[in-house]
Image (spheres, grey):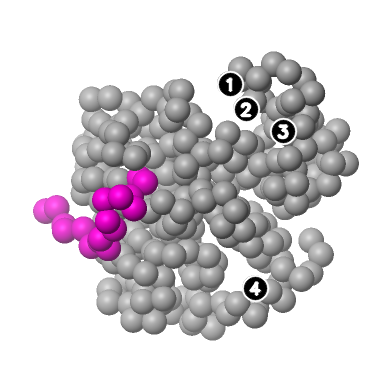
Amino acid sequence: MTRSTPSVALGSGDRLLEVDGLGRSFAPHRTVLDNVSFSVGKGEILGLVGESGSGKSTIGRLISGLDRPDRGTIALNGAVYATPRRAANLHGTLRRDIQVVFQDPYASLNPRRTVEAILADPFVITGERNRAQVKGLVRALLAEVELPEAVLSRLPSQLSGGQRQRVSIARAIALKPSLIVADEPVSALDITTQAKIVDLLRRLRDRLGVSILFISHDLGIVGELCDRVVVLDNGHIVEAGPTRRIFERAEHNYTRRLLASMPGGKRRSSNDSAKAAAHVG
């Protein structure tokens, strides 16, 4: 039986991404997503949380055009780009508007190419041929993600995990997207580096106005970063709302269980994040 989907209303003019009645099955008796509906506001960081196997990454793949839904639609700025009859084809404007930051930055970066070549690719692929212009754009990207120019000549294997993820984020913002799908982008990093990447994502949202769908199982990080939270359990949305309300007055037993499983049973404080970010890593 299809369950109803909790939601928090956004004005139509505030919605960037709209997911409506999304369903995905991988076998006759294995439904991964069922009637999932939510929206991401313009300039909003929306957290999508749930345990392993809840369907979080499947949603990310559908939104980013790496898979197609069996049911439902996905729209960006009111234009539907993914349906059961039409795979999401992220070309032209959509390729610019939707970018992905993956969990493992080493696996998502070409190990044989330098940082400079990796960051130049988005500009070259979209038609920029002036080499001096491309070099200037690449250096501007490094400044945005707070990396020194010394990394330009390095290969991904010569970078730390945090530096690699900053390169991945720089590549994602190169074409000034409207939406970044960040799929567990800090789970492979140590806690001090996690705090720095979270702070970077927050600053990029504030500076660039980009929306972020932040997919994570770590409610402590979600509590620090996200404006709203969508809680996913076994392919269904069980709760959604402003982050503060979810953390302080969760209504669903599953959400309360997730919160109770956090270290200390509560969200990490801003002071804790600031202390972590102050460490070198």
Whether residues under marks 3 and 1 lie with C-beta atoms below 8 angstroms apart, the answer is no
Amino acid at pointer 1: Thr
Disc 1 versus disc 2: distance between alpha carbons? 6 Å
Residue receiving disc 3: 137
Q: Which numbered disc flags the more N-terminal residue, 3 or 4?
A: 3
Q: Which numbered disc flags the more N-terminal residue, 3 or 2?
A: 2
- Relative placement, left or right, of 190 versus 61 is right
Amino acid at pointer 3: Leu
Which residue is found at the position 39% from the left and 64% from the top?
229
Disc 4 versus disc 1: distance between alpha carbons? 38 Å
Q: Which is nearer the eye, 265 or 87?
A: 87
Which residue is found at the position 71% from the left and 40% from the top?
141
Amino acid at pointer 2: Pro
Above or below — where is 2 with respect to 261?
above
As helix, strand or loop, the secondary structure at mark 2 comes to: helix
Q: For residue 23, what is the image quadrant?
A: top left
- Residue 154 in the image, given as x and y percentages of width and height: 84, 36
Whether residues under marks 4 and 2 lie with C-beta atoms below 8 angstroms apart, the answer is no
Residue receiving disc 1: 126
Query: Which numbered dot is residue 273?
Result: 4
- Relative placement, left or right, of 202 versus 135 is left
Outermost residue, right side = 150
